Image (cartoon, rainbow, N blue to C red):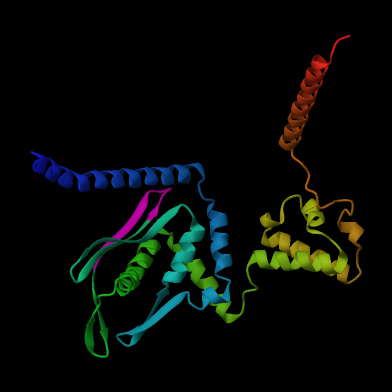
Amino acid sequence: MNDLAQQFQQQSQPTTLAQASSSREMEEVKGQIFMAKQFPRNVFQAEQRILDACKRPSLASTAMYQYPRGGTKVTGPSIRLAEVIAQNWGNISFGVKELEQRDGESVAMAYAWDLETNTRQEKTFTVKHSLKAKGSIKKLTDPRDIYEKVANDGARRLRSCILGVIPGDIIDNAIKQCEDTLKGNSKGPLKDRVAAALKAFKENYRVTQEMIEERFGYHADAFTEIDYLNLIKIFNSLKDGMSKVEDWFDKSVTSQAKKSDLAKSFDEEKKEVKDDAATSETQTEQSELPLD
């Protein structure tokens, strides 16, 4: 009976672990969907982030792949560009999973899932644990070599899945921006240009970021291309002597940010709590005084 009980426990243990793992993954998926519904993407901001990323020369130089086929050249967005687009698009889950590893091969799955629209692309494939080198087939036995082989073969499937989820016009605009960056027509990401402009104002005219934000009415992180152009016009006006700093900015603005009504009410409540605590402490001390 003891042997039968031990055998039953050994058989039921993998099933229990599999159920626990499945439940954990299900809860993680539910959490991701809940967060995606609570914080939906802003399509225009997401597209702007993608285009700003494509203005980096390091990304633009690796954004496209090209290889000959049938006397023509085949080009398309690379896995690096697809990953950057997916990261900036937001609320999308993507990756490569190794489902099973058998003798001499692995079964893997590449997937991309838009958590907002519930659009999913997945591809299951088999990777042989072998590598062709110098006209001969080399069998892979090192776990690291096998992992790199699966990741390399999965990258192409992953790119296809991501491109199948992201809208086509977003992909086309990103490719065009990468081409403009390589041609030298791009002036760099908007955030970098705004940071350079803020630095120039501070070094040349002692105009701080808070003074600029006070004039525009919002934080510098929310600046658009129009705001940047207006900032350049003000700088050129000051540089040419057509206007003065006082004409544009309020010098009385300090670096300390203005507190919101919520922050003020919190400070008032905090002050009331301190006053109540001080009053209570005073009453306690008075009660402990000896009476004549």
Please state the horizontal and vertical placement of residue 64, each as a whole percent of the image.
Answer: 45, 76
Dominant secondary structure, magenta? strand
Residue 53 left/right relative to 19:
right
Q: Quadrant of residue 185?
A: bottom right
Please state the horizontal and vertical placement of residue 124, each as a whole percent of the image.
Answer: 26, 62
Specify whether residue 170 is in view.
Answer: no
Q: Give the residue displayed 78% in from the left and 58% down from the top.
A: 209
Please state the horizontal and vertical placement of residue 7, each as a whole percent of the image.
Answer: 12, 45
Residue 3 left/right relative to 163:
left
Q: Give the residue displayed 29% in from the left and 46% down from the top.
A: 22
Residue 3 part of the magenta segment: no
Q: Give the residue displayed 90% in from the left and 58% down from the top.
A: 247
Residue farthest top in this picture? 292
In this picture, which residue range is highlighted in magenta? 113-126
Q: Give the residue displayed 15% in from the left and 46% down from the top.
A: 11
The quarter of the rendered structure image containing the C terminus is top right
Please state the horizontal and vertical placement of residue 277, each as a whole percent of the image.
Answer: 76, 25
